[in-house]
Amino acid sequence: MVENNYDILGITEGSTEKEIRDAFRRLALQFHSDRGGENKQFIKIKQAYEDLKIGKKYPETDFEKIKNSKVYSDETDSNIKRKNQILGQQLSKEMKTAEEWAAALNRSNLTATRLFGSKTLGEIELERKANGALSIKGNFMAGSLTYDGPVIMQGSITSPSWAQEFRTNIHLTTGDFKFVNPLENKYKIENGAKIIVDNGNIIVGNIFGRKYRVDDPDGKVGVYRILEHRTHISAPNGKIISENVTNTVSLDADTIIVLNVEDGVTISAREILFYGGKFTHDSIIELKQGGSIRFFENFSIQGLSGDAIIKLENGKKLRLFDLKTKKIKDLADEFVPNKENYRKDATLVGSGFTITYDMLDNLSKKSNKKVVGHQN
């Protein structure tokens, strides 16, 4: 089993800040070199304490330490790429073995636990449980894994932008994909990883893509291009529940529940629920027919970014800027059919508001008629 920071300090998960601090002080007195202890063990204890203070459950793997070290980052680009290609290839082979191992257990309906990777690559523990769920403990950093059943994840997910052929792809044919307490543990998905759940839900924490600048390949001074590693999360027949979604991410589901959305994010769903106060920077909502967009936070449509786009399934597009000139109540009063049966609180619930597909479709039709009339 992968040792976490609670294990290092000898305490249980869910310990209070005081219990974590007291455990560190007790072990520090025992292992500090000034007291005749082991210096390496003290460093390990101190790092575990620092990690838990920021909510990080697992210590860095050797691979993460290498990747984040100054020596590693100061090497030439060609050397970094060569090392990363090797690491990506090795990790992908390990995950292929893990996939075959999990599938064999599934076919036989057996339970087992096994470590994959290495101290250099980073260890990850897989456990096939009696109910068919696959437990993953550790950070998933490269390679593909397909599983016929639910997955319970304790760790973050990233993808090697330096080796796209070893991109992280997790595919569930049945069952839910869930992070364990993602907000508390600071688990995240980032850097172009892809998760697809055919028939189930996805419950995760923060989701990030990656966009970065590279110099011109021909060596032209002052000329550069932008590369993008878009993170894709898809549950076409279920829900995606996440916190903050930022910087070149695509979400696709029947229902999406999200906190904040920023910078080049595309959200495609029938029902979309926003619980935060941000929807900004070239983001797109693709609303499916018969659907709705629900804002729960106490701010008006005036607080949303004007450069965001709403696309309807029939191909029509509207800018949030075009809706800013209308109060949402007026929009509902004007376009909701059967006004005599319409309750005012059906759209304006609490401090938030709802925009339906039909309202947006009718608004688009009305706008087009106005343009035609003006031209005549």
Image (cartoon, rainbow, N blue to C red):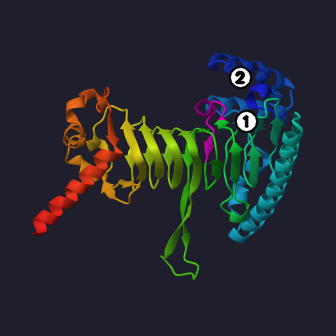
Q: Does 144 appear in magenta?
A: no
Q: Quadrant of residue 214?
A: bottom right
The percent coordinates of residue 303 (x first, y second) are 29, 42
The percent coordinates of residue 3 (x first, y second) are 81, 33
Give the camera-side residue of 345 and 328: 345
Q: Quadrant of the N terminus?
A: top right
Left or right of 120: which side holds 58?
left
Mark 2 or 1, nearer chain start: 2
Residue lying at 76% horizontally and 32% vertically, measured from the top left: 4
Q: In the rendered image, which residue does mark 1 sit on?
A: 58
The percent coordinates of residue 301 (x first, y second) are 28, 42
Give the camera-side residue of 2 and 349: 349
Is residue 116 visible in the rendered structure shown here?
Answer: no
Residue lying at 58% horizontally and 53% vertically, measured from the top left: 232
Left or right of 294: which side holds 124?
right
Q: Secondary structure at mark 1?
A: loop
Q: Does 188 appear in magenta?
A: yes
Q: In the rendered image, which residue does mark 2 sit on?
A: 13
Cα–Cα gap, marks 2 and 1: 12 Å
Give the camera-side residue of 361 and 201: 361
Left or right of 200: which side holds 60?
right
Left or right of 45: which side holds 320?
left
Q: Which residues are magenta?
A: 179-189
> As shown in the figure, which amino acid type bears the numbered disc 2?
Glu
